């Protein structure tokens, strides 16, 4: 079996991802990654497990670590995250489980 060149595939994807999506939230424009980075996908898994730290990981990966506090202060929530992923990345992030008690 021949080797799969992930480096070459990644380079080709990056060349076609010159235009990064821009979203406006809380009156501020944010430039997002053209595709969700692995850290965002890991964070989504944590969110779906009901862990809030995953939500902050996702926001940091999308908006940048320095913007997390501002995005949260503007009221960004799971509905916003779901809408963003559907509109920008064509992905359904699902819903986190209800907290049990």
Image (spheres, grey):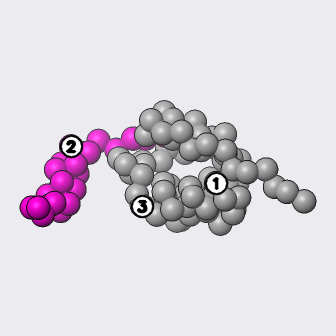
Name the disc covering residue 48, or none.
1
- Residue lying farthest to the front in this orientation: 1
In what element is the residue under mark 1? helix
Q: Nearer the viewer, residue 38 or 58?
A: 38
Image quarter of the N terminus? bottom left
Residue beneath disc 3: 38
**Mark closer to the observer (1, 3):** 1
Residue 25 in view: no
Whether residue 63 is situated above or below residue 94 in the rendered picture: below
Q: Which residues are magenta?
A: 1-25
- Residue count near mark 1 (Cα–Cα under 10 Å), binned few <14, some 14–19, many ≥20: some
> Is 19 within the magenta?
yes
Horizontal and vertical percent position of residue 15: 18, 48
**Mark closer to the observer (3, 2):** 3
Whether residue 60 is situated above or below residue 17 in the rendered picture: below
Horizontal and vertical percent position of residue 74: 68, 48
- Residue lying farthest to the left in this orientation: 2
Quadrant housing residue 55: bottom right
Horizontal and vertical percent position of residue 92: 54, 39
Residue beneath disc 2: 16
Image quarter of the C terminus? bottom right
Q: Residue at x 26, y 45 (%)?
A: 17
Horizontal arrangement in the rendering, residue 32 relative to residue 99 (left or right)? left
Give me the C-alpha separation between circle 3 and circle 2.
Answer: 19 Å
> Is 10 within the magenta?
yes
Give me the C-alpha separation between circle 2 and circle 1.
Answer: 30 Å
């Amino acid at each position: 079996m021949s080797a799969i060149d992930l480096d070459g595939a990644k380079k080709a994807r990056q060349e076609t991802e010159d235009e990064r999506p821009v979203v406006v939230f809380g009156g501020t424009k944010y430039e997002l990654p053209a595709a969700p980075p692995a850290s965002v996908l890991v964070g989504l898994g944590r969110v779906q497990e009901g862990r809030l730290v995953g939500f902050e990981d996702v926001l940091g990966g999308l908006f940048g670590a320095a913007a997390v506090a501002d995005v949260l202060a503007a009221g960004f929530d799971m509905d916003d995250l779901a809408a963003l992923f559907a509109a920008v990345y064509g992905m359904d992030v699902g819903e986190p489980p209800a907290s049990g008690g």
